[in-house]
Amino acid sequence: MSKSVVDRLKAEFAEKILSSHDEHGDDEVVVAPADWVTVATYLRDDPQCAMQHFIDITAVDYPEREPQLPRFDVLLLLRSLKSGFRIRIKTRISDGDQLSTLSSIWKGCNWGEREIYDMFGIVFEGHPDMRRILLYDEFEGFPLRKDYPIEAAQPLIPYREVDGIEKLAPFGKEEGQPWNRIDWLNRLKGGDKQVSPAIGVQQGQRSSLSSTAISKPKDATRGEA
């Protein structure tokens, strides 16, 4: 069982394993950021652990923990190809702190750590290419942070060529129009077409897509079915 991997870590690192649990059958150990690379390297190289399979690295934001505790959890998921054991390693860091990269241990971490940086703003020290991977450079903020404003508007940028990258040019008007470029509010103004219950409510239209509260007009005295 994967519990044997946890026991081996406790025997090897003692007080460096801050806590452990196996909730829902998933074995997890918590380590300090300073021990992040040491424990990860041991899990890969120790013959009995043999965690050569990098599964994923991700993060979770708990801003309500500040200032008593660091707001971010960074989680590393590993599997042994030899035994099939799985384990999750977790550490906690504060906003603005850096965590050492694992990209030299598992190459898959290169992309995973860039994604975490892109979504949460967590910087991995020693990463060979620490820049955004999904969003564009002009994007402001980190959208998977719990305090990212839902109404935030991002700057639009024109199509541009990028050296060393081949990509398709954007669609022309004769080829169609993306849904997000359609001004539905103006298109539906004064009409009775129902596309979205939420937009329909804003336009004072009758509900027709469902019987949920949001699809019903505020003025229920009109007697609509």
Image (spheres, rainbow, N blue to C red):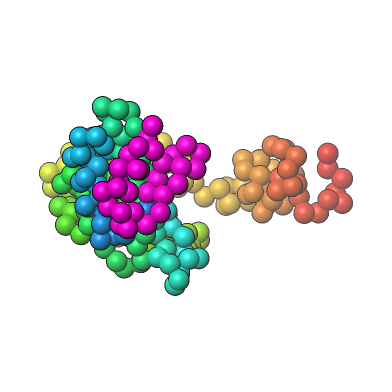
Front-most of residues 117 and 102: 102
The C terminus lies in quadrant: top right
Question: Is 3 inside the magenta-drawn segment?
Answer: yes
Task: Residue lying at the far left in this picture: please name it.
Answer: 164
Question: Residue at left 25%, top 42%?
Answer: 43
Residue 208 shows up from this direction: yes
| Range drawn in magenta | 1-29
Q: Quadrant of residue 61?
A: bottom left
Q: Is residue 174 above or below residue 125?
A: above
Residue 161 inside the magenta-drawn segment: no
Say which of 6 and 129 sits in front: 6
Q: Residue furthest bottom?
A: 67
Image height of 112 relative to 80, above or below: below
The structure residue drawn at horizontal position 34% and vertical position 62%, both measured from the top left corner, is 93
x and y percentages locating residue 145 in the rendered image: 43, 59
Is residue 91 among what the camera can see? no
Q: Position of residue 85 (x, y in %)?
A: 34, 32
User: Of residues 221 and 44, which is closer to you in this image?
Assistant: 44
Q: Position of residue 147 (x, y in %)?
A: 47, 63
